Image (tube, grey):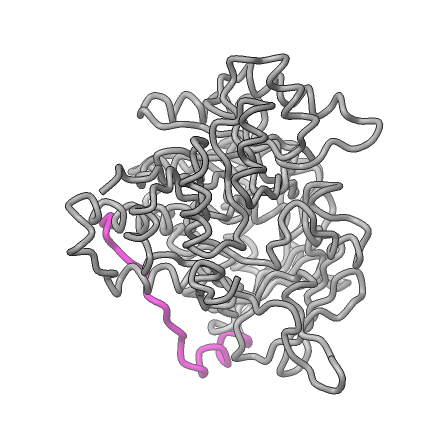
Amino acid sequence: MPSLPDLVCPAGSLPALKAAIDNGADAVYLGFKNDTNARNFAGLNFDQKSMTDGIRYAHAKGREVLLAINTFAQAGRVADWQKAVDAAVDQGVDAIILADVGLLDYAVRRHPQQRLHLSVQGSATSYEAINFCQREFGVRRAVLPRVLTLAQVEHVIRNTSVEIEVFGFGSLCVMNEGRCWLSSYACGESPNTVGACSPAKYVKWDKQPGAMETRLNGILIDRFGDDEPAGYPTLCKGRFDVQGETYYALEEPTSLNVLSILPDIVKIGVRAIKVEGRQRSPTYVAQVTRTLRAALDSLRDGSERFHVKPAWQAELSKVSEGSQATLGAYNRPWR
Amino acid sequence: MSPNFVIPRFRLPAFIAGIGQKLPQWPHALVLVGALNAALKMKLLPETELTALEDKLFRVRVLDTGGEACYTFSNGLFRPVFRPQREPDLAFAANLSAYLQLLARQEDPDTLFFNRELEITGDTELGLIVKNMLDAIEWPALPQFPLLRN
């Protein structure tokens, strides 16, 4: 049995960071309060003071802080992204998670000692792409997009010495990570340009008798009956009229949950398991971190005896988007 | 409150809302505004986000008690609005148990929203600011604030 992977948990605020650490995260990831990170939502993320406090809190308990600068430098404003990299180094984060190859190049030249991770937004699904980033930018870890089967993840791991991080829990989307422009199609803004998918200022929740309508920049995304679970207002999770039939044409609101295949993920040598959700509250972070910590710890004594406790599943199902969970691409029979 | 206390999901009987709607609404508004101003005084609310709340009208409706409170934020203080003249900029509606679970940080607002136990209407971005502001508050440790911890 290889050693247990790190549990990497989201922190959108200082209380969320503390919740992650207190409930057993090995590392937290966070972002600055600007469009250099893909969760650039009002009121979320860290200023200099809260980041200093957060890093001190994590390091005092021997945990790591990873900083996501996972959007792409925009034309004419490249210096803003470079300054974010400099600020992250000054703050003393354990690693910077980058997606933009131009920025990776800047970071490795300017700060050769800084540990760099390749973001999921970097969209590297093959070991060739990952080994390229290792050779050119000294990348030490890569976060895999959520499109690979477990066998494909293993194939990547066998062909690279870069540490591999995979997603273990959280909201799913169409997973065209780092290349998705659906949000821009609806409202002219998307994660790659402003650091947010379906920004809140374009979202309207409209209560109608017996139903709730969601609109994104005026486009009807979905209509939920009073008993139907709701999801985030993104185009990929909308129900649309396709040739006379109305259904989730791209993706249903759902969450990834790898509990049932956790022993396999550990066995193939995954180095870290990531939890999605910097936009969620400290409560969610505590619930998910606590649950995955318990599941991982139960593997420490050997995977043969591992079984998913109903209480773990219940806790994770409750906080899932659309109140349902899936193994996503991991157990897909086709490639 | 014991650290293991869990607020159950419950819904008060329908007749309570019927009575609640007939009762004066000003006590709810006063209690809520008092709590918010206390948080202000303790410097728990971040000043940068507070500017976004200036002169906005908020409504908090408790479905199963039939109670509702409207308030606004102006000149550095939360103030009750007893006879709102317009639709609120941001409105919350939920049963009492959902609000208690939120306050105790026992449930996540997105979870309650996905499960249709919390309704947010109006200016969505304002809603996000309020939600993230509440999430970023570092409540004083026990025992000073026992009602807000689970």
Say which quarter of the image contains residue A18.
top left
Q: Magenta segment range?
A: B1-22
Left or right? Give the position of A97 relative to B57: left
In which quadrant will I find the N terminus of chain A?
top left
Q: Which of A252 and A15 lies nearest the eye of the viewer?
A: A252
Please tell me how many numbered marks the rendered image carries. 0
Q: Residue at x 66, y 45 (%)?
A: A178
Q: Residue placed farthest to the bottom in the image?
A: A244
Asked whether the viewer can see residue A116, the reply is: yes
Assess whether residue B10 is covered by the magenta stretch: yes
Q: Is residue A335 above or below residue A284?
A: below
Q: Which of A160 and A76 lies nearest the eye of the viewer?
A: A160
Say which quarter of the image contains residue A253.
bottom right
Q: Residue at x 37, y 42 (%)?
A: A270
Left or right? Give the position of A211 relative to B3: right
Assess whether residue A211 is covered by the magenta stretch: no
Q: Which of B52 and A76 lies nearest the eye of the viewer?
A: A76
Across and down, in percent, residue A137 comes to 59, 23
Across and down, in percent, residue A87 comes to 60, 18
Across and down, in percent, residue A30 comes to 52, 34
